[in-house]
């Protein structure tokens, strides 16, 4: 298991997520509102979103789909366009685009692939964000890792 996010940090994903939210309070507030949750859950959700983005960056040959709650956090992060763009470039060397598309079956298959990759890299995903077999997947589809 590899707890780091990208090649350009020695921090764990959880530490990086906390540091970013300590600096960007409005982002944390928006995540809390979107998830209707408290501080700790919002921070866990942000860390899970960063883990998902790291999977996308590492597996650019695949199209991955997040769980619904991870996608909600990702939507909030993307709204901070400069922060999000800089983060992607600094951590992954490329911008990770969000591309709504795909059929329900395609998204379900991509979600299963995402979970397998997550398990290999990070261990068991927290049920609060990734759920079990009946987990709701992102309704807006998948994402692409495209260098810009």
Image (cartoon, rainbow, N blue to C red):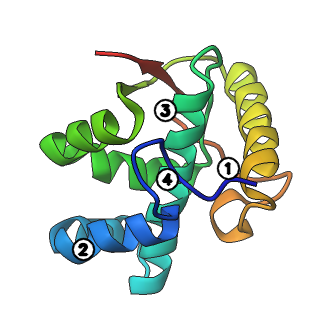
Q: How many marks?
A: 4
Spatial distance from mark 1 to mark 4, Cα to Cα? Answer: 15 Å
Q: Position of residue 111 (x, y in %)?
A: 71, 36
Spatial distance from mark 2 to mark 1, Cα to Cα? Answer: 23 Å
Q: Position of residue 35 (x, y in %)?
A: 43, 68
The numbered disc on residue 29 is: 2
The numbered disc on residue 49 is: 4
Q: Earlier in the sequence, mark 3 or mark 2?
A: 2
For this view, does 109 lie left or right of residue 58? right
114 up-or-down from 23: above or below? above
- Residue closer to the observer: 148 or 3: 3
For image coordinates 48% across by 44% down, the residue present is 6
Quadrant for the N terminus, please: bottom right
- Residue closer to the observer: 54 or 75: 54
Q: Earlier in the sequence, mark 4 or mark 2?
A: 2
Question: Which residue was labeled with disc 3?
Answer: 140
Which quarter of the picture shows residue 66? top right
Q: Secondary structure at mark 1?
A: loop
Mark 3 crowdedness (10 Å alpha carbons): few <14, some 14-19, many ≥20: some
Q: Depth-wise, is mark 4 or mark 3 nearer the camera?
A: 4
| Callout 2–callout 1 Cβ contact below 8 Å | no
Spatial distance from mark 1 to mark 3, Cα to Cα? Answer: 11 Å
Question: Which residue was labeled with disc 1?
Answer: 136
Q: Position of residue 53 (x, y in %)?
A: 49, 41
């Amino acid at each position: 298991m590899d707890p780091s996010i990208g090649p350009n940090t020695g921090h764990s994903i959880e530490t990086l997520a906390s540091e970013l939210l300590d600096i960007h309070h409005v982002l944390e507030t928006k995540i809390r509102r979107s998830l209707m949750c408290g501080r700790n859950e919002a921070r866990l959700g942000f860390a899970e979103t960063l883990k998902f983005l790291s999977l996308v960056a590492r597996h650019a040959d695949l199209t991955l789909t997040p769980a619904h709650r991870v996608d909600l956090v990702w939507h909030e992060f993307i709204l901070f366009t400069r922060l999000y763009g800089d983060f992607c470039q600094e951590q992954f060397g490329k911008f990770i685009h969000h591309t709504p598309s795909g059929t329900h079956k395609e998204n379900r298959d991509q979600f299963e692939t995402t979970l397998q990759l997550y398990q290999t890299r990070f261990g068991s995903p927290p049920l609060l964000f990734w759920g079990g077999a009946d987990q709701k997947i992102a309704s807006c589809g998948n994402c692409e890792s495209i260098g810009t």
